[in-house]
Image (cartoon, rainbow, N blue to C red):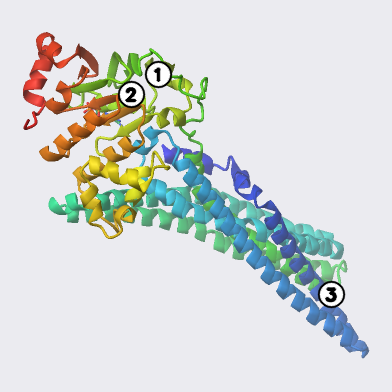
Amino acid sequence: MDLQRGRRGADGRGGVRVLWPYVREHRRLLGAAVVLSMAAGGLSLVQPVLVGRIITAVGDGAPLDGLVWALVGLLAVGAVLGTVEYYLLQRTAESVVLTARTELISHLLRLPMSEYRSRHVGDLVSRVASDTTLLRAALTDGLVEPLGGILVLVGSLIAMMLLDPVLAVVTVLVVAIVVAASLQVTRRLRALTFETQSRLGDLTGDLNQTLSAISVVRATGATDRAQARLGDRVRSAFDAGVRAARSGSAIQPLRQITGHASLLVVLGVGGYRVATGHLTVAELVTFILFMLLFMGPVNTAFTAVQSVAAALGALQRITDIQQISAEDATDTIRHRQLPAPSEAPMLRFDGVRFGYRPDQLVLDSVSFAVVRGSRTAIVGLSGAGKSTILALVERFYEVDHGRIDVAGADITDLPRSVLRSHLGYVEQNAPAVSGTVRDNLTLAAPAVTDEQCWTALATVNLRDRVATEAEGLNTQIGEHGIRLSGGERQRLAIARALLARPPLLLLDEPTSSLDSRNEEIFQTALEAIAPDQTVVIVAHRLATVKNADQIIVLDQGKVRAVGTHNELLGTSELYRELAHHQLIGTPN
Ligand SMILES: Nc1ncnc2c1ncn2[C@@H]1O[C@H](COP(=O)(O)OP(=O)(O)O)[C@@H](O)[C@H]1O
Ligand SMILES: [Mg+2]
């Protein structure tokens, strides 16, 4: 699908204009670079004139001092201009890459949740890392250099027109034909670059996934197969690269043909014009000198179309992401704040229907209410839709039908940030974020003190574990710091959620990785949660479920029964079965 869009973009629609947003912010500096480049070009137009004067002066035996100094000065100024222009241009191009990366990252962090599931993380990473660098070439080779050459182009063209209009028109015609041909080539080049970069994205995506599951790959003896699969991806990136190179290489001969063909045509037609007396030999030589000057910018233009074509291919992959609206782009906000505490249920599902895909029904007419300050357990077989219920409260996805209220307000009427600031959420496979133990704990509540952090760690029995680390709360988690086990990560996530003291706490099987001792500790922590905090917990332990004020029995996306443990034992066949076979009892 991406490729389709790339191809459409590659037809040339959208064109160079799509570069503009990236250029706009830096237009002054880029403009300065263009002016410097033009000035350097303009000086080069004066050189032949000065050289001509010097030759004439030598012939006349006139004094040379002034002319020679002028030439030296001209060369020196040209060199300085060139240096400044080069630095300015490269620096600005880096800034453009900086802007593009910053914006892309900001956008990548705000995509709708479904996008992360449908794309490889590695591919998204390669868009930030690799595609943005092609922008730099587009600006330097593609934009500023050719613009800088315009003065030389126009100057030499005027000189040629003055010398012999017929010959000038013939020259321009030859150049125009070859340039048109090379534009055809670049259309293809753009699509091919898009494909090369996409193959590269597939490769980084796969490699990233393989490396993050390397222990599974090793343990299952699948290393050779993984290597073969990745090898195929490398190969396919290579093939796309070669196809792009093949297309690009057609531009080189075209460039030479322009040079040779125009020279031959000018010599032929010019010789004829000299023979017929329209032109002197001296004029023809001057014409040819100006034609050579004229070819300079034309050659630059060839490089330009090549790198702009490549950049546009890569840019397509950047804009593909930027065109996806951010998660909250279409929000209609009716309330800036959650309503003040009232009699309204803390959480209410009303006829909620939802599927991750249009053809899929994960939740079907789900309705229930959670009283403020109560404990609600959701039970059901794996795949029943329990985690989905919590994800919908977080508004990671939008319901297809029905509504969800938090504290009496429809959650679609609130800014997501406000809604989420009132929720605590412990995911089923709670991942730790990058940073220190403190970073992980204070994520939802940046203002908490170290003291509070240690207390929270003690609540989940992690205090001693962290205290043994020399750096304590400053210990990095992950690659260069402590490696937490699944259960430890889960406990850290619980501590994080408890610290923020959110009005509504959503816990998704928070004890799935805990041993029975830590399970008990968790029960105690759960009981200690402030009475004004509301808890919804997806549970698979009898101990957690038994004490709940209300239990929701979910089966294949439908609410089958609601009640307390004792009530449900009497009324729900399914609950009895679950209590018997699925809900695992704890030692006490
Ligand atoms: N991101 C997703 N994309 C598509 N389908 C999903 C996604 N997450 C869950 N599902 C499907 O939705 C159904 C319910 O999943 P889930 O709510 O995780 O169940 P539970 O937590 O009760 O085990 C399952 O059939 C699952 O395959
Ligand atoms: Mg689940």
Q: Residue at x 65, y 49 (%)?
A: 25
Q: Which residue is the site of mark 3?
A: 49
Tell me the kind of residue under disc 1. Ala
- Please state the horizontal and vertical placement of residue 305, each as a whole percent of the image: 59, 55
The answer to whether 45 is drawn above or below residue 70 in the figure is above
| Quarter of image, res 291 | bottom right
Residue 129 lies left or right of residue 498; in this view the side is: right
Disc with the residue nearer the chain's start (2 vs 1)? 1
Residue at the limit of the structure toward the front, as seen here:
451
Residue 151 vs residue 61: left or right?
A: left
Task: Give the residue at mark 2.
Answer: 532
Q: Judge whether residue 180 can be spotted in this image.
A: yes
Name the mark nearer the viewer: 2 or 3.
Answer: 2
Disc 2, disc 1: CB below 8 Å?
no
Q: Is residue 192 above or below residue 494?
A: below
**Secondary structure of the residue carrying numbered label 2:** loop
Residues under labels 2 and 3: Cα distance?
89 Å
Q: CA distance from mark 1 to mark 3?
A: 83 Å
Mark 1 burial class by Cα count in 10 Å: few <14, some 14-19, many 20+: many
Q: Is the N terminus in the top left, top right, bottom left or bottom right quadrant?
A: top left
Q: Which residue is mark 1?
A: 407
Q: Nearer the viewer, residue 476 or 469?
A: 469
Q: Position of residue 586 (x, y in %)?
A: 9, 31
For the residues bearing labels 1 and 3, Cβ distance under 8 angstroms: no
Amino acid residing under circle 3? Val
Residue 350 image position (x, y, % from top left): 34, 12
